[in-house]
Amino acid sequence: AVVSTQSTGVRSISLKILEVLPIVKCSNNDYLLLLSIPKEHDILLKFTSKSLREKFCEDLINLAEACKVEIEHREVRMKQMLRSAKTESHRQQLVDSFLASIFSELMKKDVPIPTEMDTTDDKEFRMKGIGSDVLQCELTRAEFASAL
């Protein structure tokens, strides 16, 4: 479970359902750690010290081994880490694009699919091709329910 600085529960993840858990450490900031959760938005953790981050990683690796989950380690610079992190809004945009493409196909209509790459000034969305990330999108029950 992930807890906020106010000690309230933010999110929990079951390692039992994962095959691989990518752990990304920040090479130029000893306090940051990114957990890339497949098919969900990522978790960016900020620790108060490098030793706490390392202790967390050690405990997480032990827990993952007990659950037979493979750990992938990477180390990147902070700018790259923050750029590559899949945020909740990015994930929501992917879900929206996925559903728009599905409903468009069902109705055989061309529907503009909003993407993050669209930078039109007048807020109109240009027609975009359906990217592979949209086609490979797998929804959780909660995402599907909230999208409907």
Image: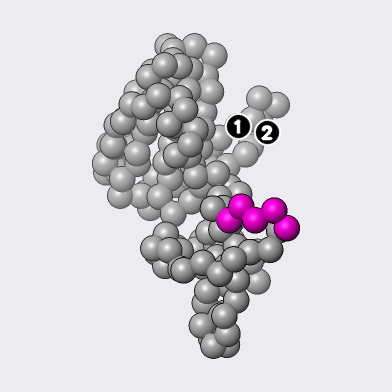
> From mark 1 to mark 2, how far is it between C-alphas?
5 Å
Mark 1 touches mark 2? (CB < 8 Å): yes
Q: Which mark is residue 145?
A: none
Q: Nearer the viewer, residue 148 or 97?
A: 97
Say if 115 sits above or below 42 in the image.
Answer: below
Task: Quarter of the image for the C terminus: give it.
Answer: bottom right
Q: Horizontal placement of 68 versus 136: left or right?
A: left
For image coordinates 52% across by 28% down, the residue present is 45
Say if 94 sits above or below 73 in the image.
Answer: below
Q: Determine if residue 121 is in view.
A: yes
Q: Horizontal placement of 94 versus 124: left or right?
A: left
For image coordinates 56% across by 69% down, the residue present is 127
Residue range in magenta is: 118-122
Q: Which mark is residue 8?
A: 2
Position in image of residue 91 (x %, y %): 54, 53
The quadrant holding residue 5 is top right
For image coordinates 58% across by 56% down, the residue present is 118
Q: Which mark is residue 3?
A: 1
SS class, disc 1: strand
* Residue 131 drawn in magenta: no
Position in image of residue 35 (x %, y %): 43, 36
